Image (spheres, grey):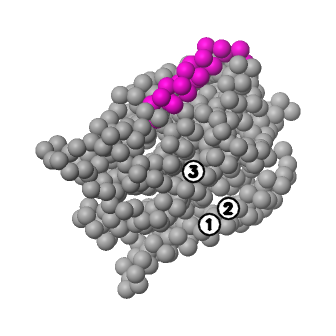
Amino acid sequence: MADSIQSSLPLILILLPIFGAIFTVLFGFTKFKNAREITTLTILVVEFIIAIRLAITVFSGNTLSALGQSLFVDGLSALIILLVDGMVILIAIQSIRYMKHEQAEGLVTDGRLTLYYALILLFTGTMNWTVSTNHMVMLYVAMEGTTLATALLVAFYRKRASLEAGYKYVLLVVVGITFALLGIVLIFSAAYPHLKVGAHALLLTEVGRIAQLLPKNIALLGVAFMTVGFATKAGLVPFHAWLPDAHSEAPSPISALLSGLIIKIGAYALARTVTIFAPSYHSIVIFIAILSSASMLIGIFLALVQDDLKRMLAYSSVSQIAYVFEGLGLGTYLGIYGGLFHMFNHTLIKALLFMSVGTIMYATGGLRKISQLGGLAPKMPITAFCFIVGALAIGGLPPFNGFMSKFTLFFAIGEQGIYWAMVISILTGLLTLACLVSAAYRVFWRAPVTPIGGEQDIEIKKVPFSMQISMIILALLCILIGVYPQILFPILDSATKAVLAIWALGGA
């Protein structure tokens, strides 16, 4: 592994938004209009600039450390940090007008709105901590920190349904991640007598050495526990029960945050731990392939029968995150590369789709059932364009970005001879395309639906351009990456090699 440069940048990326959250809570009530929104955006923009500086250093062939080796940023960490800090800015931009509208409707108070922005900042800090920590136990603690921040956002409206969704999210994810902690403890306990690294044995950069020292039965049991925990965080079947409720009950910008970012943490943790064992134990590859294939099919079948747009997208996430897990579970260069590529693309696509649903709800007074909508394209052309781009991209149709990452994964799975999993992946892609394109047609291009008991069309409120900026940026990125995927190759190559470098360390 390359020598690590001591730097304060990883620590700043964690502490800046956390202290910003505290500042927002303490000074959110001011006489200045939009003070908390401006403060939040300013902090997030500064955070993103620092993230770019960090990424440039890392992608140039270096790694960064802070607090000794407690924080460690390589190509994989830098990729996720860029995704998190970039996406949170777009989500915050759309939140400004969306949440002002919710406040005007009496759904949230001014004090709750201050808490909303503080929680977004807290989420950003805990996410950066999760992908920067180099300690196995701290990885568990940081993941629980992201759970706390997002649970409060899921239950933000404090209605019965949202409170239930928040409670279910906390309960299932905390229990699931505890299984991951048990797996970590089991593996470390079995390997400790053989380790020569002493106090550093719990560092994630030492997992490669640990993987080579364990008896097979202990390794497989520990990996099974960790897979259960990280699959719960990601929302894979059969650990997905929290995901549809959380995504559908949270404010729409937070649904974009949940599907676009929070479920990726489970995939990140899998890449840091379980993926390292896959080259040594082929049964791990098959186990994750079976789990992922089941999640793909069940998720998309459930999405196909949904009338609620947000629940449909939520079940689609259950299906799509399985592609990421399957690629990472292969443990090969091409599999990891394809998994990370699809993780990046899914973040953009699913955030785009949830933001589009948010604008639909804004314009129609909260309607989100497909059966109640229709003929919106002439009145909402930008939203219609963005939604259909997202639908075609998530279905894997060229020339959009989803096609490139899915094709890479198909090739990686076939390269390992797991043809049944490849067939299921391709079938899921076709069903996803049918599901999302059908929904787009019914919402935007079929004849308008007449409200029950009335003769007039649904009144469409004009959507502010500030709510559409984030969607337009994401839609253009989906097209750009699909047409010119080479723009991501150096970043994905660095992230993939960062994962494989830990495994190679064990074979040295």
> Which residue is the site of mark 2?
51
Q: Secondary structure at mark 2?
A: helix
Q: Label 1: how many residues lie within 10 Å, few (<14), some (14-19) or many (20+)?
A: many
Q: Are marks 3 and 1 in contact (CB under 8 Å)?
A: no
Q: Which residue is mark 3?
A: 475
Label 2: few (<14), some or many (≥20) within 10 Å? many
Q: Helix or strand or loop: what does disc 3 sit on?
A: helix
Q: Amino acid at mark 1?
A: Glu
Q: Quadrant of residue 9 in the image? A: bottom right
Q: Does the residue at mark 1 contact the one at mark 2 (Cβ under 8 Å)?
A: yes
Among numbered discs 3 and 1, the one appearing first in the sequence: 1
Amino acid type, callout 2: Ala
* Secondary element at tag 1: helix
Q: CA distance from mark 3 to mark 1?
A: 23 Å
Instruction: Write down the residue under mark 1.
Output: 47
Tell me, yes or no, if residue 428 can be seen here.
yes
Range covered by the magenta-colored residues:
416-436
- For this view, does 127 lie left or right of residue 35? right
- Mark 3 or mark 2: whose residue is earlier in sequence: 2
Name the side, left or right, on which 485 lies relative to 83: right
Q: Residue 18: within the magenta?
A: no
Does the rendering let one see residue 340?
Answer: no
Image location (x, y in percent) of residue 131:
63, 50
Type of the residue with mark 3: Ala
Where residue 91 sits: x, y (%)?
A: 49, 58
